[in-house]
Amino acid sequence: MKYRTAMISDLPEVAKLYVDGFKHQLHTIFGRHIPEKIFIDFLYRVRKLEKNGFIVACENGKIIGFTIMSVNPFKLYAKIFLLSFFPSVYSLISGRYSGICFHKALKSFLDFVKFSQKSSFADKKYKNAGQVITMVVCESMRGRGIGGNLLHRGLDYLKKSKNTVKLEVRQDNFPAVHLYKKNGFVEIGIVHSKVGCSLIMVKHL
Ligand SMILES: CC(C)(COP(=O)(O)OP(=O)(O)OC[C@H]1O[C@@H](n2cnc3c(N)ncnc32)[C@H](O)[C@@H]1OP(=O)(O)O)[C@@H](O)C(=O)NCCC(=O)NCCS
């Protein structure tokens, strides 16, 4: 198993893993058809802005897991929004994101902003913390420590400039909650949203 920072050529595989890993939540937002291109474009921006926090696990040339960590999540999302707004509108109009209408895209974006506001209210004290943005391991490879290894590598990256890290995780996501608790994260709040309840967790690095 090899762990390294993500390359542009990895992004289609990573986007597929992301869509598979969060299919239930994404179906609630987008319906049956989830356009992977949206995630490829999003991941492209993330890689550009937070290259060393975007870590993949690969075996025999195949990507089997990834994590994204950010030293400044607010800045990361703000930059992604500014860089993506007009290209995204163009992609929606031109049909590059076929299957998703402008109304749905805007609604999910506003839901995300609402969730982020609630979550930053819950953890005001930790507004300068780094963040575990996401992590996914291919379903058939779970339970072998790959998620734990990705987490450790990501935290090593954050540790260089941050002394606290936070994350949001669905309360009913038992494997993820178990993994985070096992690695020293503690619950500091809970946020209720349309897709369920999410725990806010933090860890001192
Ligand atoms: C969360 C995730 C990345 C973990 O990856 P992984 O490679 O399985 O992680 P690890 O093997 O290092 O650890 C998983 C732990 O969860 C445990 N686990 C698995 N299923 C579980 C369950 N239903 N309830 C509680 N714990 C569970 C495993 O036993 C293991 O703990 P252990 O090492 O003490 O035995 C993976 O489950 C995943 O991709 N989930 C879908 C995407 C997701 O939810 N990401 C997190 C978003 S915040």
Image (cartoon, rainbow, N blue to C red):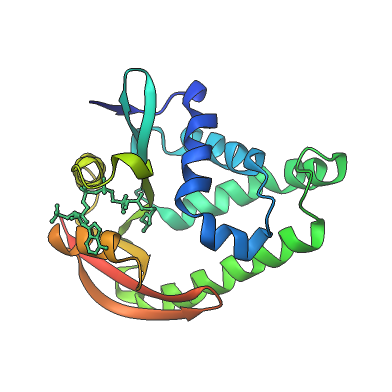
Residue sitting at 42 percent across and 79 percent down? 191
Q: Position of residue 135 (x, y in %)?
A: 36, 48
Residue sitting at 37 percent across and 18 percent down? 61
Near-viewer residue (103 or 33) = 33
Q: Position of residue 168 (x, y in %)?
A: 37, 65
Q: Relative to 162, is 94 on the left or the right?
A: right
Residue lying at the far top of the rendered structure: 60
- Vertical placement of 144 versus 120: above or below? above
Residue 73 seen in render: yes
Residue sitting at 36 percent across and 39 percent down? 66
Residue lying at the far right of the rendered structure: 93
- Vertical placement of 204 versus 172: above or below? above
Tell me where residue 30 sits by quadrant. Answer: bottom right
Q: Quadrant of ligand 1?
A: bottom left
Q: Relative to 100, is 78 on the left or the right?
A: left
Q: In which quadrant is the C terminus drawn?
A: bottom left
Q: Relative to 35, is 199 on the left or the right?
A: left
Residue 184 seen in render: no
Q: In which quadrant is the N terminus drawn?
A: top left
Q: Position of residue 8 (x, y in %)?
A: 50, 24
